[in-house]
């Protein structure tokens, strides 16, 4: 035999869908005071990207004009020197230079 | 419309079971219900992928920045909006509490659960001080009817003496609640031949839902006085 419906559940019509109300934004400081923090906090992006292969130091004497042009080119292209050198070598490998 | 947040920063306290039992019980009594599964384990989303015909809407949600607005917004479509939050102390949990008409904190009778429940209560009381009353209740889960361990009794007494509101109804340890997730059905849809104690589970679920509805009604009346 089924049990009678509890009085509280007999008529739920008094709970009506309602237009959304403004919800105050949670205070991060107040939440953090109890240890409630962003679970996936945004991680800072590293500007320098690690090389995919081992690196080495390479020192040589070059002409000042070549050095100036190289640095200006890297600045224009927003490249670290290592990446600039890599682009030149990529061009050599492709036979462009 | 009522928004109910189910939270405890500790995992494994019975949040998803509480949320699913409450949602399906309210739906059984004719209410429209949306259940937000904000737990990365997505147990309730997986439940909805099963054969259940229970007419609740289940939504997976993982964005902490707009959970409060999303919950209140869903109140335009459903009578009850229930959020099953992740078992961690996160900004998403704090945001859901701020948007909720009632926060339920399920816990078992253990010191570890109680410690984390206290964190949640401290957060709620702080928010209440800043933005008005935030009704909440502690709900003991996986209890054995008619029997309480010494730990459980001690924790109940400590909480009661601290003025922490505890629900009169527990969510008892019932095989039927586990079977809801196994067979991905509501209590009404489970096969009584395959699942023990369905009647008792339904009775317990009704008592729980009824008490929660009455708390919401009282809170609403108090707010309008």
Image: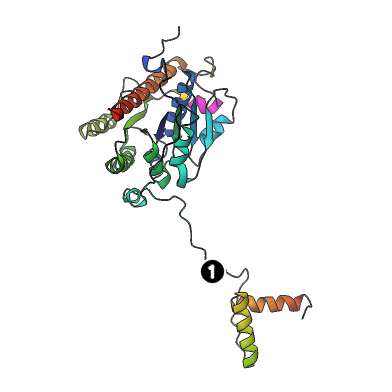
Residue A35 picture location, percent across and down:
35, 49
Magenta stretch encompasses residue B112: no
The residue positioned 37% from the left and 40% from the top of the image is B98
The answer to whether B111 is drawn above or below residue A45 in the figure is above
Identify the image quadrant of the C terminus of chain B: top left
Image position of A27 (left or right of B153) = right
- In this view of the protein, can residue B176 be seen by the observer? no
Question: What residue is pinned by disc 1?
Answer: A47
Q: Is residue B218 visible?
A: yes
Numbered range of the magenta stretch: B178-188
How far across and down, in percent of the image, does residue B162 sit? 21, 35
Task: Please tell me in which quadrant of the rendered image residue B193 appears.
Answer: top right
Residue B20 relative to residue A53: left or right: left
Q: Is residue B134 above or below residue A17?
A: below
Mark 1: few, some, or many residues within 10 Å (few <14, many ≥20)? Answer: few
Q: Vertically, is B11 above or below A32?
A: above
């Amino acid at each position: 035999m089924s049990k009678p419906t509890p009085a509280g559940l007999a008529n739920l019509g008094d709970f009506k869908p309602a237009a959304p109300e403004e919800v105050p934004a949670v205070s991060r400081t107040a939440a953090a005071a109890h240890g409630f923090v962003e679970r996936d906090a945004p991680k800072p992006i590293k500007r320098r990207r690690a090389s995919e292969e081992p690196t080495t130091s390479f020192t040589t004497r070059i002409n000042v004009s070549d050095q100036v042009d190289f640095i200006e080119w890297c600045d224009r292209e927003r490249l670290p020197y290592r990446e600039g050198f890599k682009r030149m070598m990529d061009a050599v490998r492709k036979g462009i230079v | 419309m009522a928004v109910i947040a189910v939270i405890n920063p500790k995992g494994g306290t019975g949040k998803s079971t509480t949320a699913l039992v409450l949602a399906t019980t309210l739906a059984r009594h004719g209410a429209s219900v949306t259940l937000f599964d904000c737990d990365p384990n997505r147990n309730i989303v997986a439940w909805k992928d099963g054969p259940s015909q229970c007419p609740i809407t289940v939504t997976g949600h993982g964005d902490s920045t707009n959970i409060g607005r999303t919950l209140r917004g869903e109140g335009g479509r459903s009578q009850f909006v229930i959020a099953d939050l992740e078992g961690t102390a996160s900004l998403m949990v704090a945001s859901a509490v701020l948007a909720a008409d009632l926060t339920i904190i399920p816990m078992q009778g253990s010191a570890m659960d109680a410690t984390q429940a206290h964190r949640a209560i401290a957060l709620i009381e702080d928010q209440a001080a800043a933005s008005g009353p935030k009704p909440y209740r502690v709900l003991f889960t996986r209890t054995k009817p008619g029997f309480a361990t010494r730990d459980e009794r001690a924790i109940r007494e400590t909480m009661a003496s601290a003025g922490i509101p505890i629900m009169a109804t527990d969510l008892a340890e019932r095989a039927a609640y586990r079977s809801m997730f196994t067979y991905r059905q509501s209590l009404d849809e489970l096969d009584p031949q395959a699942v023990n104690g369905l009647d008792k589970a339904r009775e317990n679920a009704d008592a729980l839902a009824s008490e929660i509805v009455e708390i919401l009604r009282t809170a609403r009346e108090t707010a309008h006085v």
